[in-house]
Image: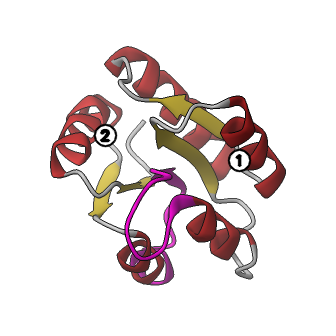
Amino acid sequence: MSNGIVLIVDDTKFIRLLASTALKPLGCTVIEAENGAMALDLIEEHHPDVVLLDVVMPEIDGFQTLAHIRSTPGMENTQVAMLTTAGMPSDLELGAEMGADAYILKPFDNDGLRAKVAELLELATD
């Protein structure tokens, strides 16, 4: 798979590096944002197919960013996976209610992350 844009949004540089390294074999374009505000700018500019979104971030958290994505015309096919340590049942429920397509808990397994993103890319480009 060589198409698709994946945006990794996490305030921890090391997590962004781990995720982008795990996704290299997919051949997708990976862009990164360190917070929700930066993510919203990159989403508007690049229209990613998949967004991997941390929940706990300064300024605009992941749930607020997800709400913005879901309310933006033209972003209907964008697949959003929450990639976070916020794994309480209430967090998973809120993510699902707000329109998250997947919920991946940190620490993540590289093969599992890659498989989930490949699946989400397929859904986004169908």
Q: Residue at x 35, y 68 (%)?
A: 35
Question: How many numbered marks have been drawn onto this rendered protein structure?
Answer: 2
Q: Is residue 2 left or right of residue 67?
A: left
Residue 54 lies, in percent from the top left, at: 45, 50
How many residues crowd around disc 2 within 10 Å: few (fewer than 14), some, or many (20 or more)?
Answer: few
CA gap between label 2 and label 1 equals 28 Å
User: Magenta includes 116?
Assistant: no
Residue 75 seen in the current view: no
The answer to whether residue 107 is above or below residue 15 is above
The scheme the figure's colours follow is: secondary structure
Residue stretch in magenta: 42-62
The quarter in which the N terminus is drawn is top left
How many residues crowd around disc 1 within 10 Å: few (fewer than 14), some, or many (20 or more)?
Answer: many
Q: Residue at x 43, y 26 (%)?
A: 113
Kind of element beneath mark 2 = loop
Tell me the residue that label 1 is attached to. Answer: 95
Residue 110 lies, in percent from the top left, at: 33, 20
The amino acid pointed to by label 1 is Gly
Kind of element beneath mark 1 = helix
User: Magenta includes 58?
Assistant: yes
Q: Residue at x 35, y 24 (%)?
A: 107
Residue 66 lies, in percent from the top left, at: 63, 63
Tell me the residue that label 2 is attached to. Answer: 27
Q: Is residue 75 left or right of residue 93?
A: left
Q: Residue at x 75, y 77 (%)?
A: 71
Specify which label sits upstream in the sequence, 2 or 1.
2
